[in-house]
Image: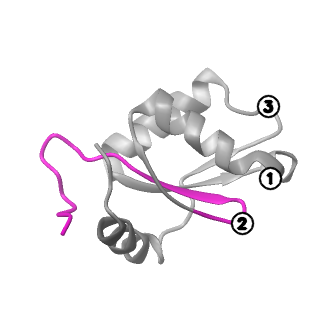
Amino acid sequence: MSLTPKQRRYLRSLAHNRKPVVIIGNAGLTPSVVNEIDVSLTRHELIKIKLNSELCTKHHEEAEKICRQTGSEWVQDIGRISIIYRPKKDPVIELP
């Protein structure tokens, strides 16, 4: 799955009012954090993830790693917050 620029804009607008669901701490991307992200994606489809300040310099690399491990798509990075999307089997969010 690959998102078009129009779909990314739409998902960014939906994510605007959402708060981060998962916060990655000093331990980094552990299996339990990946599991929590997977559960959150299954429940919400579109989530924000907040990265700790120590990981801030390589936040995009961490977001790409999360996307590979969870089968999701990167939408946007804003400072220390990444937005990722993975549709459900019966999607709630209809992409344009």
Vertical side of 69 occupied by 2: above or below:
below
Q: What residue is pinned by disc 1?
A: 56
Q: Quadrant of the N terminus?
A: top left
Vertical side of 64 occupied by 77: above or below:
below
Q: CA distance from mark 2 to mark 3?
A: 19 Å
Q: Type of residue at label 2?
A: Gly
* Callout in the foreground (3, 1): 1
The stretch drawn in magenta includes residue 84: yes
Q: Which secondary structure type mostly characterizes the magenta part of the structure? A: loop
Q: Type of residue at label 3?
A: Ala
- Depth check, front residue: 52 or 71: 71
- Depth check, front residue: 83 or 4: 4
Mark 1–mark 2 CB contact (< 8 Å): yes
**Neighbour tally class for label 1: few under 14, some 14-19, many 20 plus, Cα within 10 Å:** some
Q: What residue is pinned by disc 2?
A: 79
Residue 27's label in the rendered image is 3
Q: Which residues are magenta?
A: 77-96
How far across and down, in percent of the image, does residue 41 sit?
Answer: 38, 44
- Earlier along the polypeptide chain: callout 1 or callout 2? 1
